[in-house]
Image (cartoon, rainbow, N blue to C red):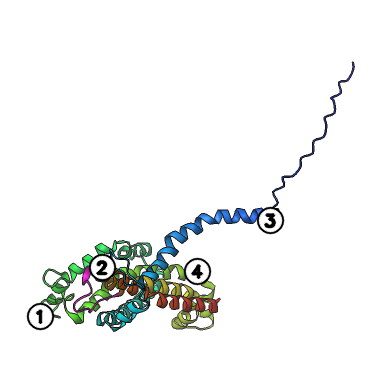
């Protein structure tokens, strides 16, 4: 039987496409193409509004009018205004007091919840309630608690004999700021507790055991083991919470609207009043004036984190 032999096919040589680009160049172009949508979104949603607000702060623009460039005129005007000076003082007092309270109580409660206490999971969940509550509801609730006639706080103080008559906390100049500080602290301290608690759980128990063997008491273990172990968490939380508290609008607006007599006026509320009067150039200057402070604070924290690393 004759064996069938397949005919030999002609060899076809596939020539490479001549695109003029090397593989490395094509990979680079592909990388840029993949990143381009993200860059475009950031430019539109973040960079453009940021620099547009800075530009507006250098103009005397009003709603419905284009305005003209006035340089640092808005900032010079604000510095001379008593409202702005009171705003700077109030913001320093508010942010400094709230952050100090959050740091002390937040760290203390986190240390307690990190111990083997009864119903620890329940207490950890309960501590989140102020943080989980919408800010609008939280500050309206505190406004009702501070009410001079129907507020529960007045009834408690009178029943305990601490005061003889009803106290108008939010309309009294000396009490308005402490009231806002208390409500802001109550609303925000759970975030500090949970963050510190997460940081505490990353500290190895071996370090505590070694310190105990060396004879270190509780304070020395806290100072030389706990604090160094969560210092990066503390720095980041302080930075974030400072920015949030400074830019917080709802706390002051819902409780006092900056009063009485500018006793609780802060930057967001002052900027909002500028918008209400249609002077968006001055309003933008109020908000933009905080940017150098935040940038300086971020650089300090970043430098401290690098030094610790």
Mark 1 or mark 2, whichever is nearer to me = 2
Res. 246 in view: no
Disc ID at residue 202: 4
Q: Is residue 45 above or below residue 97?
A: above
Magenta span: chief secondary structure = loop
Q: How many other residues sit within 10 Å of disc 1, few (<14), some (14-19) or many (≥20)?
A: few
Q: Answer with mark 1 or mark 3, whichever residue precedes in sequence.
A: 3
Estimate the spatial distance between the alpha carbons at disc 1 and disc 2, rounded to whole Å.
Answer: 45 Å
Estimate the spatial distance between the alpha carbons at disc 3 and disc 2, rounded to whole Å.
Answer: 55 Å
At 76% from the left and 40% from the top, the residue drawn is: 14
- Magenta residues span 252-266
Q: Please name the residue that numbered disc 2 is placed on.
A: 278
Disc ID at residue 24: 3
Q: Is the Cβ of the residue at disc 1 closer than 8 Å to that at disc 3?
A: no
Mark 3 or mark 2, whichever is nearer to me = 2
Estimate the spatial distance between the alpha carbons at disc 4 and disc 3, rounded to whole Å.
Answer: 42 Å
């Amino acid at each position: 039987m004759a064996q069938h032999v397949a005919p030999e096919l002609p060899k076809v040589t596939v020539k490479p496409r001549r695109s003029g680009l090397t593989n490395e160049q094509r990979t680079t172009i592909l990388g840029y193409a993949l990143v381009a949508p993200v860059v475009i979104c950031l430019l539109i949603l973040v960079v453009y509004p940021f620099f547009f607000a800075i530009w507006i702060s250098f103009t005397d623009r009003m709603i419905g009018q284009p305005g003209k460039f006035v340089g640092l005129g808005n900032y010079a005007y604000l510095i001379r205004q008593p409202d702005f000076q009171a705003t700077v003082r109030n913001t320093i007092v508010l942010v400094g007091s709230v952050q100090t309270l959050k740091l002390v109580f937040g760290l203390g409660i986190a240390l307690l919840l990190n111990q083997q206490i009864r119903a620890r999971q329940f207490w950890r969940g309960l501590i989140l309630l102020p943080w989980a509550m919408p800010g609008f509801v939280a500050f309206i609730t505190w406004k009702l608690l501070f009410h001079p006639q129907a507020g529960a706080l007045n009834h408690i103080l009178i029943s305990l004999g601490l005061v003889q008559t009803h106290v108008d906390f939010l309309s009294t100049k000396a009490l308005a700021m402490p009231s806002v500080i208390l409500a802001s602290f109550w609303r925000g301290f759970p975030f500090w507790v949970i963050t510190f608690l997460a940081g505490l759980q990353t500290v190895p128990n071996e370090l505590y055991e070694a310190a105990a063997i060396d004879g270190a008491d509780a304070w020395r273990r806290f100072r030389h083991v706990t604090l160094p172990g969560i210092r990066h968490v503390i720095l980041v939380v302080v930075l974030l919470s400072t920015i949030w508290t400074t830019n917080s609008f709802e706390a002051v607006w819902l409780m006092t609207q900056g009063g009485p007599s500018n006793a609780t006026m802060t930057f967001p509320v002052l900027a909002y009043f500028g918008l209400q009067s249609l002077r968006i150039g001055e309003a933008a200057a109020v908000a933009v004036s905080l940017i150098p402070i935040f940038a300086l604070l971020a650089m300090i924290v970043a430098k401290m984190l690098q030094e610790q690393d």
